[in-house]
Amino acid sequence: MQALKALVIFMGVLIFAGLGLLVYGLLTRVGGEDTAEPERPQSLKAFGIVESTLPAGATVGRVSVENGSVVVEVRQSDGGVEIRLFDLSTGAAGGTIRLLTTP
């Protein structure tokens, strides 16, 4: 009986400590505002219009800007996906990654 009582007390302390850590984690993620300014490129050069042809039936899924590049997700009509990279400073196509579906 003594061991069972000690076990229940120990579990109660663990639950209390876990809740405390949970509250601390929530407060540090939500409460603190990020005061650092985002990193900006030192100089942006105008590069005009960049054209990239999509295959018939393809659609643009997502577009994001990361590390000075524009990442464009192109969804193919057959279920495949292409990821196209463009350099922000020059507008040049950096490359294409094709993810094909198996039959």
Image (cartoon, helix red, strand yellow):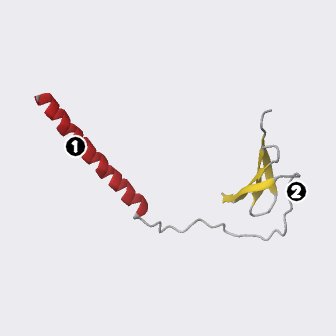
First in residue order: circle 1 vs circle 2: 1
Name the element at disc 1. Answer: helix
What is the crowding at mark 1: few (fewer than 14 residues within 10 Å), some, or many (at least 20)? few
| Contact, mark 1 vs mark 2 (Cβ under 8 Å) | no
**Residue 60, horizontal then vertical, whole percent:** 77, 56
Task: State the image quarter where residue 9 is shown.
Answer: top left
What residue would you read off at disc 1? 13
Classify residue 87 by image quadrant. bottom right
Q: With respect to residue 3, does 85 lie above or below? A: below
Q: At which x and y percent is residue 23?
A: 33, 55
Q: Amino acid at mark 2?
A: Thr
Location of residue 60 with respect to 33 vertically, above or below: above
Q: Nearest the camera: 26 or 34?
A: 26
Residue where numbered disc 2 is placed: 53
Coordinates of residue 11 in the picture (x, y in percent): 23, 38
Quadrant in the picture for the C terminus: top right
Q: Amino acid at mark 1?
A: Val
Alpha-carbon span between mark 1 and mark 2: 62 Å
In the displayed structure, 63 sits above or below 99; it is: below
Q: Which residue is at a point 39% across and 64% down the rendered structure image?
A: 31
Q: Which is more toward the observer, 8 or 93?
A: 8
Residue closest to the eye, 16 or 49:
16
